């Protein structure tokens, strides 16, 4: 077995187990190359004969080709047996000749759902009396209702469903809750664009109530798309508990959570800087801000501007010191913000400015504004001039300096990104137009001191692509200090477990330094904040920035009563104005683990299913969702929402690039399941709201990666591939075309089971229980031992979230052990007449099929159910579906035998050696050969002698001799190990002169190819001119050619000896 197959199962070929060909182990590189060469040679000869036949009968050939092409088009195998939705699929009909995803995946999911297999209540267990450790409860990370799932969601679903199915088969009560997120900003943007496109209206034309109705209408029309994709992926969700974050039940939980936290002082109102998107006219969260790095002067497209805007430069200008001839030079990347400057800061120990302490500078555009020179240790004396302009209302660092030094906060940019009306000649300008105007005005006044390149990060709104503007806004905040401390303590104390462990450091770093969470969003779609501004009759009107005049309430009446009690007046003297803002989408998502069960009521579901067991998601939302669920659960319910967190890696494309619509490398999992043409892939780009230039780039990317579109792979192959590559802590560079390899594995599985069922014979009835008879053959005992190891490794992998280890164990058992060795070894027995031996081996074969399908089921649910239903049952009271059948456990009737496995491994190496020599000397597969095994000792000879029948079956021998004596002359020899040599009798089997000529000719051709590659690689400009991927490919070719030449050289030497 190669190193590759030990870490990730390699996609199998499409051939079935009954093809009579020697199995190809991945470690046998030379064998594989030679086999490929032979296949090409046979193909070439067949093509040659076909061309000759076509020359003789061109018309007949053309007709045959047409018929063949028509036949190919028609060869789509589908399940056409009339079956009512939710009824069990008919598996009494004959198995199709080949695996077909469309056939296999039909009807099963609806039956699973209707039968209630995915519900925790299945089986009639008393849920209230079930201990926590016997339950497995998990939430879906709710995808946004706006979009369609991509392969990242596919990975999430695949991992989570593997775990849900595995725990269910392990006998636990399993609940996996599906749902969708209302995605405040994203949904509002989508519907606003739709409204403008179709009616040329804005949301303000409709008003809040009518616009919200439009969103609900859109949600009812399009919201089912996500769920249909989840159905297609085969997730074993409890659909009766599906939850949408704007459902009435969840809205009530959101309102209650806000009110409780506000009453406890953990939610408060404050005026602070927020990430403001002028295009959206809303504050956005940190996760919705993309940080675009620029190395120097860069022109970027900004919504609302005809020309690109300059970033990545540092502009210097002078402030004149009042009552002095001196000036102080400052530098900024956003020169327009100097309109809001209210001070200049220097380091208190900077000797250059000692004489300016306590003085002022004059603002050039506002005669009445004198800016104090303040002392602050935050200033970096080594950067620029060591003097910093302070704009507290438009910069996060300046905000803190302004607070410390009691500077005025002057807002000069409004919500729409326009300069405010109190800025003289610049009033009403767009902010980036003002950038140019301010710069010119400084030049006109002789205050401009230069511009230079400056690496910087430009904050971009991920939704609108607008440049974020820090603005001062009165907003609601969650005080995170106490809540974060609890979350840190939970991980440190071991109550919470995060896998992989590498993210512990990230958890601590973020939570120990977390800032208070701004939860206000200036949107119409979402949970309107249940906070009310209070006006008291007969009292002066307060400012809405005064948190003392705000109350929260589950309803307006509750809030009115609270306000009356707070201000000690009659409720009739209270006037309430509800905050128009909505809550950050992450607020409702943070409550998902308990809001879905009906909290704040103490429902049966809350009592039974909270706390949950596992949260599985991508590591990119560790802070924004996982941490907030933990803090909310601990604060509101006094317990963790889950005990384990598994963070899966991010999926990148085959080139290691981040998935992006503009690159054209976003892939819908349904397109992989059903297949899609390149033309249809291109059409999908038109729905992504990309610019024309981006569409062209994306189309080119799709054409390069999927020149023939994406082939139909089926959901089982997709799921298996995603899980198999999800090594902990690493991103996944996933070539979609590699998924097709697992479709071939499904075909191998199909053919193997079909052959095995034929081998079991009509009317076969397995033993009612797993048992050994004591009459099992060596191969029977070996395959049971390998099954034992597969069971052990699969369970260990699932328990430790080491999914590649689990998939590799199961894959290797089916492909390399059951199909390549055991089934091949059974063929002579099945054709023979020893009925007692047949019965024993058939029961072993049944055990392998039964246990093997169950091992594979969590990863490949559809094909395993299809094949499992076609197996005979041990007892009539067996569970109705594989998904509620026990997962294999280590069992005395499936014993591990280390010594036997060591012997078999040695025998397999002997067989590989013989096959390799057959390939080297191009012996036809049907030619029987004499084999002599020269052993170093009698024990080895005796051991190999007990496997003569296996060796003969696998190598097509006419005779085998195992001894410690030398073989007769005329043999080719290969060393297996110090214990054994294999000798093949070639004399009389091949035309030595003819074979020598062939090999010499082949060697000469290969040497020419190697020589050309070597010459090219030795050129001085090779590294500079030849792309890295081409150089890598050339290196591989040279290695392959060198190995092939060495093999041929060895073969020539052997033939020369035989000729002598």
Image: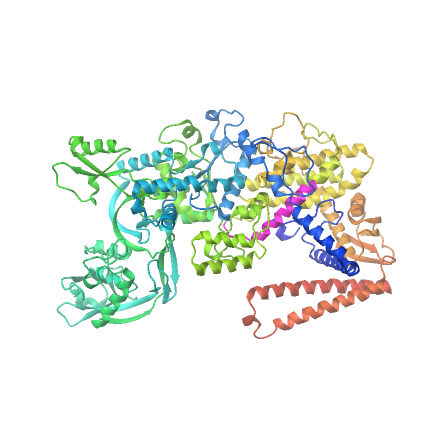
Q: Looking at the image, can residue 611 be seen?
A: yes
Vertical side of 25 occupied by 312: above or below: below
Residue 94 x/y as whole percent? 69, 36
Residue 567 x/y as whole percent? 16, 34
Residue at image x 18%, y 69%?
320
Q: Quadrant of residue 748?
A: top right
Residue lying farthest bottom?
1020
Residue at image x 30%, y 56%?
469
Q: Pick the residue in front: 334 or 280.
A: 280
- How many dots with numbers? 0
**Quick check: 200 left or right of 840?**
left
Q: Quadrant of residue 864?
A: top right
736 within the magenta span: yes
**Quick check: 155 left or right of 753?**
left
950 within the magenta span: no
Vertical side of 803 occupied by 124: above or below: above
Q: Pick the residue in front: 440 or 694.
A: 694
Residue at image x 37%, y 31%?
599
Q: Magenta-highlighted stretch: main secondary structure?
A: helix
Q: Pick the residue in front: 341 or 279.
A: 279
**Quick check: 393 left or right of 961?**
left
Q: Looking at the image, can residue 638 be seen?
A: no
Vertical side of 930 occupied by 173: above or below: above
Residue 406 x/y as whole percent? 19, 54
Magenta segment, which residues?
729-752
Image colouring? rainbow
Residue 789 x/y as whole percent? 64, 40
Residue lying farthest left?
538
| Image quarter of the C terminus | bottom right
């Amino acid at each position: 077995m190669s190193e590759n197959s030990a870490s990730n199962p390699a996609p199998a070929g499409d051939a079935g187990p009954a093809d009579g060909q020697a199995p190809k182990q991945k470690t046998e590189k030379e064998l594989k190359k030679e086999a490929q060469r032979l296949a090409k040679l046979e193909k070439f000869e067949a093509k040659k004969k076909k061309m000759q036949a076509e020359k003789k009968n061109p018309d007949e050939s053309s007709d045959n080709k047409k018929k063949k092409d028509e036949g190919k088009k028609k060869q789509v195998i589908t399940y056409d047996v009339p079956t009512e939705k939710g009824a069990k699929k008919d598996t009494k009909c004959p198995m199709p000749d080949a695996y077909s995803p469309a056939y296999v995946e039909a009807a099963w999911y609806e039956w699973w759902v209707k039968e209630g297999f995915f519900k925790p209540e299945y089986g009639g267990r008393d849920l209230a009396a079930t201990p926590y450790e016997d339950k497995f409860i998990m939430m879906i990370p709710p995808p946004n209702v706006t979009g369609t799932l991509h392969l990242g969601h596919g990975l999430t679903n695949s991992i989570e469903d593997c775990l849900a199915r595995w725990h269910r088969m392990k006998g636990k009560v399993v609940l996996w809750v599906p749902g969708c997120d209302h995605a405040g900003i994203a949904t509002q943007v989508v519907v606003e664009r739709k409204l403008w496109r179709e009616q040329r209206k804005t949301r303000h034309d409709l008003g809040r109530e009518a616009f919200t109705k439009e969103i609900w209408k859109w949600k009812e029309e399009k919201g089912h798309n996500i769920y249909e994709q989840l159905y297609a992926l085969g997730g074993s969700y409890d659909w009766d508990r599906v939850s949408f974050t704007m459902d009435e039940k969840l809205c009530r939980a959101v309102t209650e959570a806000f009110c409780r936290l506000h009453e406890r002082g953990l939610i408060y109102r404050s005026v602070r800087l927020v990430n403001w998107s002028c295009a959206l006219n809303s504050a956005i969260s940190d996760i919705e801000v993309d940080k675009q790095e620029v190395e120097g002067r860069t022109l970027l497209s900004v919504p609302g501007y005809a020309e690109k805007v300059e970033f990545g430069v540092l502009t210097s200008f002078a402030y004149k010191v009042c009552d002095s001839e001196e000036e102080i030079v400052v530098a900024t990347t956003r020169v327009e913000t100097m309109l809001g400057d209210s001070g200049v800061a220097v380091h208190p120990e900077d000797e250059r400015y000692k004489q300016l302490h306590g003085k002022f500078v004059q603002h050039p555009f506002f005669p009445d504004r004198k800016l104090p020179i303040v002392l602050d240790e935050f200033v970096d004396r080594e950067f620029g001039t060591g003097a910093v302009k302070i704009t507290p209302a438009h910069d996060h660092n300046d905000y803190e300096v302004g607070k410390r030094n009691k500077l005025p906060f002057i807002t000069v940019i409004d919500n729409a990104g326009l300069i405010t009306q109190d800025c003289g000649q610049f009033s009403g300008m767009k902010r980036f137009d003002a950038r140019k105007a301010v710069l010119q005005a400084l030049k006109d006044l002789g205050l401009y001191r230069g511009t230079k390149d400056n690496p910087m990060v430009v904050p971009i709104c991920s939704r609108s692509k607008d440049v974020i503007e820090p603005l001062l806004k009165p907003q609601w905040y969650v005080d995170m200090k106490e809540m974060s401390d609890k979350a840190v303590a939970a991980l440190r104390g071991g109550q919470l477990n995060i896998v992989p462990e590498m993210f512990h450091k990230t958890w601590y770093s973020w939570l120990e330094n977390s800032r208070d969470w701004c939860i206000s969003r200036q949107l119409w779609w979402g949970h309107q904040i249940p906070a009310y501004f209070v006006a008291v009759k007969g009292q002066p009107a307060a400012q809405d920035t005064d948190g003392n005049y705000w109350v929260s309430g589950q309803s307006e009446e509750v809030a009115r009563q609270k306000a009356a009690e707070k201000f000690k007046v009659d409720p009739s003297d209270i006037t309430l104005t509800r905050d128009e803002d909505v809550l950050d989408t992450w607020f409702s998502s943070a409550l998902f683990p308990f809001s879905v069960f009906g909290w704040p009521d103490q429902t049966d579901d809350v009592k039974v299913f909270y706390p949950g067991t596992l949260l599985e998601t991508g590591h990119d939302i560790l802070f924004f969702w996982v941490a907030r669920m933990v803090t909310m659960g601990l604060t509101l319910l006094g317990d963790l929402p889950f005990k384990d967190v598994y963070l899966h890696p991010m999926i990148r494309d085959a080139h290691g690039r981040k998935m992006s619509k503009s690159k054209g490398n976003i892939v819908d999992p349904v397109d992989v399941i059903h297949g899609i043409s390149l033309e249809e892939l291109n059409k999908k780009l038109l729905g992504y709201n990309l610019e024309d230039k981006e569409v062209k780039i994306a189309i080119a990317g799709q054409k390069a990666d999927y020149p023939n579109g994406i082939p139909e792979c089926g959901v089982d192959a997709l799921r298996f591939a995603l899980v198999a590559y999800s090594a902990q802590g690493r991103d996944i560079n996933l070539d979609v075309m590699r998924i097709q390899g697992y479709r071939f594995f499904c075909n191998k599985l199909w053919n193997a089971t079909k052959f095995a069922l034929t081998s079991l014979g009509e009317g076969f009835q397995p033993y009612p229980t797993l048992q050994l008879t004591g009459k099992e053959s060596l191969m029977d005992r070996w395959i049971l031992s390998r099954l034992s190891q597969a069971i052990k490794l699969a369970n260990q992998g699932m328990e430790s979230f080491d999914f590649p280890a689990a998939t590799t164990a199961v894959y290797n058992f089916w492909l390399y052990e059951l199909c390549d060795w055991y089934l091949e070894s059974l063929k002579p027995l099945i054709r023979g007449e020893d009925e007692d031996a047949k019965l024993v081996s058939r029961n072993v074969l049944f055990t392998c099929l039964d246990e093997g399908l169950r091992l594979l089921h969590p990863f490949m649910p559809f094909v395993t159910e299809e094949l499992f239903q076609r197996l005979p049952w041990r007892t009539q009271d067996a569970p109705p579906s594989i998904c509620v059948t026990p997962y294999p456990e280590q069992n005395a009737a499936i014993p591990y035998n280390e010594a036997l496995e060591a012997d078999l491994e040695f025998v397999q190496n002997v067989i590989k050696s013989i096959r390799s020599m057959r390939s080297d000397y191009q012996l036809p597969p049907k030619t029987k050969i004499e084999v002599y095994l020269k052993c170093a000792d009698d024990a080895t000879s005796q051991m190999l002698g007990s496997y003569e029948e296996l060796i003969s079956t696998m190598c097509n021998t006419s005779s085998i001799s195992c001894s410690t004596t030398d073989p007769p002359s005329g043999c080719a020899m290969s060393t297996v190990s110090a214990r054994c040599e294999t000798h093949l009798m070639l004399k009389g089997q091949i035309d030595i002169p003819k074979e020598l000529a062939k090999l010499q000719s082949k060697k000469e051709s290969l040497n020419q190819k190697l020589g050309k590659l070597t010459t090219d690689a030795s050129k001085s400009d090779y590294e500079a001119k030849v792309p890295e991927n081409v150089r890598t490919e050339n290196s591989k070719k040279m290695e392959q050619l060198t190995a092939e030449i060495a093999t041929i050289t060895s073969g020539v030497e052997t033939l020369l000896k035989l000729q002598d």
